[in-house]
Image: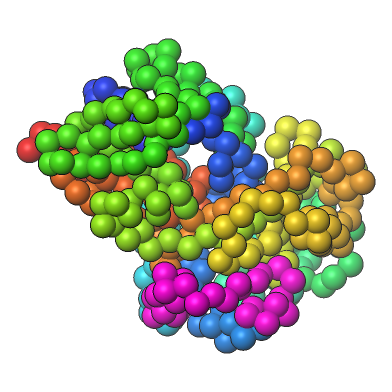
Amino acid sequence: MATAYCLARDGLAVTIIDRNLSPGMGASFANGAQLSYVYTDALANPALIKHLPALALGLDPAFRLRPSFDPSQIGWLLTFLRNATQARFEANTLAGLELGLQSRLAMHALLERHPLDFHHRQAGKLHIHQDQGAFASAARMVELKRRHGAMQEVLSDADARAIEPALAGRQAPIAGAIFSPQEEVGDPHLFCAAMNEVLTRDYGVVSRLGSTVMQLSDDGNAAQLMLDSGEVLTAGHVVVCAGIDAKSLLSPLGVRSGLMGMKGYSFNAPAGAIAPVHSITDVARKMVFCCLDDTVRVAGLAELGRMDTRLAADQVRALKAGAEEALPGAADYRRARGEWAGIRPMSPTSLPDIRQVSGRVSINIGHGMLGWTFAMGSAERIAKQLLQGVSA
């Protein structure tokens, strides 16, 4: 939806094609709702590599690796490992920070023009660390990111509890916290629905919801899309923003997407007696909490290599139990509802792939756990690429 907006705003005729009957029903439907513009740390890092055997053996309840002999997964893992050096981790993190800050500016510019309602607010974000070593590494990254435009603070246990009432019920000690005061939250599904209305009403965008693209081709003169209805659409250019499903769409063009699915879960619960004032990430549990209106959304868990969106009952129970243990009074967990699972399209670098892959086809994919955060900045980048091509 962000890409469609940037292209239509800049004067191009745009048609949106989505297999679902309403927009934002995939990975955008019920993710963590975090607009983490400065927390862009790449997944591949030296500390995680040491942890890989435990992941493969299923010893980490929050993060699991599903081993496979699939050549594409093996290739992805090898590239991921090459990006786990300290130098590449820092480079990928800073590249993500640059895109995150661009996204923040683009989102604010959009909202100045179109004040959309999607429970958006500047909540600030707390990353809570239990492990002293992990906290020390995070504090070092704060110093690096500050030099590149990030606003972050390093807090003690007492400092964190002083600014966040939801931590009052937490029994586990805190080694320290990273506070990012400018971070925001917003419901990405509501955003997509509101954007679709604005695009069709104000920009003449044609929204073809409930249409599945069966095949994408490019003969050099135009791009063709065959729909499940048998209809063939022709376009001067196609931008694929299909998340993990981009793999099957791009394969006939000979394009390897380099994506790996990472399954995550979420649920909503009524706000508790000490609901979070800020967005909170429990780093050890790989779990996020934020308030969307009068509801607390909890999202987390990571199953690398999983491609199904089935709700695994044991994982849902684990997420709820972990949330209640981490922040007991933050939500009424007994009244939890809206359990959901989605697939994050992960690249080995944790950076999206934004480029032209053939004469008439471009891609904007691979945003991983930061798809909501990177959406507006990525859209600006792909729109700039296309407009430069049109003017040339």
Q: Residue at x 83, y 57 (%)?
A: 317
Query: Is 172 drawn above or below residue 87 in the view shown?
Result: above
Position of the C terminus by quadrant: top left
Query: Is 323 drawn above or below residue 42 in the view shown?
Result: above
Q: Nearer the viewer, residue 108 or 216?
A: 216
Q: Residue at x 62, y 46 (%)?
A: 31
Residue 175 drawn in magenta? no
Q: On the rendered structure, is 66 left or right of 76?
A: right
Q: How many marks?
A: 0
Q: Quadrant of residue 159?
A: bottom right
Q: Residue at x 53, y 32 (%)?
A: 20
Q: Percent position (x, y) of residue 39? A: 53, 59
Q: Percent position (x, y) of residue 17? A: 41, 30
Position of the N terminus by quadrant: top left
Q: Quadrant of residue 193?
A: top right
Looking at this rendering, what residue extends furthest in the top direction? 201
Q: On the rendered structure, is 387 left or right of 139?
A: left
Q: Percent position (x, y) of residue 337? A: 81, 40
Residue 75 drawn in magenta? yes
Residue 286 appears in the rendering: yes
**Residue span colored magenta:** 55-84
Residue 181 appears in the rendering: no
Q: Nearer the viewer, residue 103 or 309?
A: 309
Q: Percent position (x, y) of residue 210? A: 50, 27
Q: Quadrant of residue 318?
A: bottom right
Color scheme of the displayed model: rainbow
Q: Residue at x 80, y 56 (%)?
A: 313
Q: On the rendered structure, is 246 left or right of 27?
A: left
